[in-house]
Image (cartoon, rainbow, N blue to C red):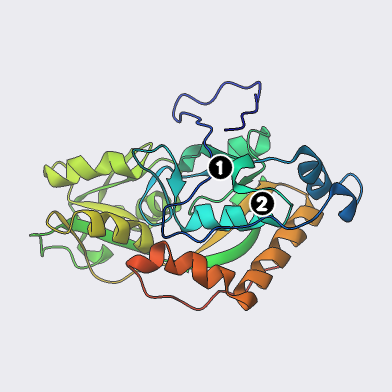
Amino acid sequence: MRQRTTGWIALAAAATLTLSACGGDDTPSVEPSDVEAADFPEGSTMAQLAEAGSITIGTKFDQPLFGLVGPDNVPIGFDVEIGKMIAAELGIGEDDIEWTETVSANREPFIQEGQVDIVVATYTINDERKQVIDFAGPYYVAGQALMVRADDDSITGPDDLAGKTVCSVDGSTPAGNIEANYPDAELVTFAAYTDCLDPLRNGQVDAVTTDNVILAGYVSESPEDFQIAGEQFTEEPYGIGLALGDDEFRTFINDVLEASFEDGRWQAAWESTAGEVLDTPEPPAVDRY
């Protein structure tokens, strides 16, 4: 396992962990391309990463199907596979990826402070975030939904949330949407979505809200406890976060994504991870803003 010292103390809200990037038995292996630093524009982020031979990627560690660390301390999921594909196009193999846990509240600070090179972490592209970081993508379009207890039929959509207690995550788009548009609901937030699961089981909260694909992972793990209530009620385009103003790197990542849509790598990554529970969607159109 290769390690690199960042020289920075992680935010108290999220522990930082360096891991070898290996998928599960069903995850396709991602082989690095035969490229060198000289193949990229001099001084570009691509050249620097290719020269270093390693990349630090922020992702979630607690979200089934997209970014989850199991007992072997290895992250797996669709976001992880997207990160591997980008690294591979820089000539960086799986063993030279350093995975850093990013929760919703620290994604922008981690990018701004240089603690990660990119963030692939169910990260909704929006105008507010684009003021401080840049996004490549989207590589998937999710939608906000609600998860309730398996025996609860009182909530079928966001219009049923008046007087209900809803759990979400600090700094997340779903939490902001509930606060702004459903003020009759009582919103409670934690650092991670997994912190909402036991309160929902125990009846301390009535619903958990985040993106439909994240909730689908929790339901797939505990169908006796949870169910999705109704349909998604927003569109959440997932992008790859990177440093503000790094146009060359953003263009490079967008090129990698579009190539993966065409050659089947994106579909293979989906089907080996989120596709175990969800149907394979059509890839979204990349927004080269």
Q: Quadrant of residue 137?
A: bottom right
Residue at 89% of width from left, 44% of height from top? 43
Image coordinates of residue 268 in percent, x first then y, are 50, 69
| In this picture, residue 258 sits left or right of residue 245 | left
Tell me the kind of residue under disc 1.
Answer: Gly
Image coordinates of residue 274 in percent, x first then y, are 40, 63
Per the rendering, the mark at residue 87 is: 2
Image coordinates of residue 265 in percent, x first then y, are 58, 69
Looking at this rendering, what residue extends furthest in the left direction? Answer: 151
Label 2, secondary structure: give it.
helix
| In this picture, residue 56 sits left or right of residue 48 | left
Q: Is residue 101 visible?
A: yes
Image coordinates of residue 171 in percent, x first then y, are 46, 43
Of the 4 image quadrants, the one containing the N terminus is top right
Is 278 situated above or below 102? Answer: below
Q: Is residue 184 visible?
A: no
Residue designated by label 1: 58
Residue at 25% of width from left, 59% of height from top? 220
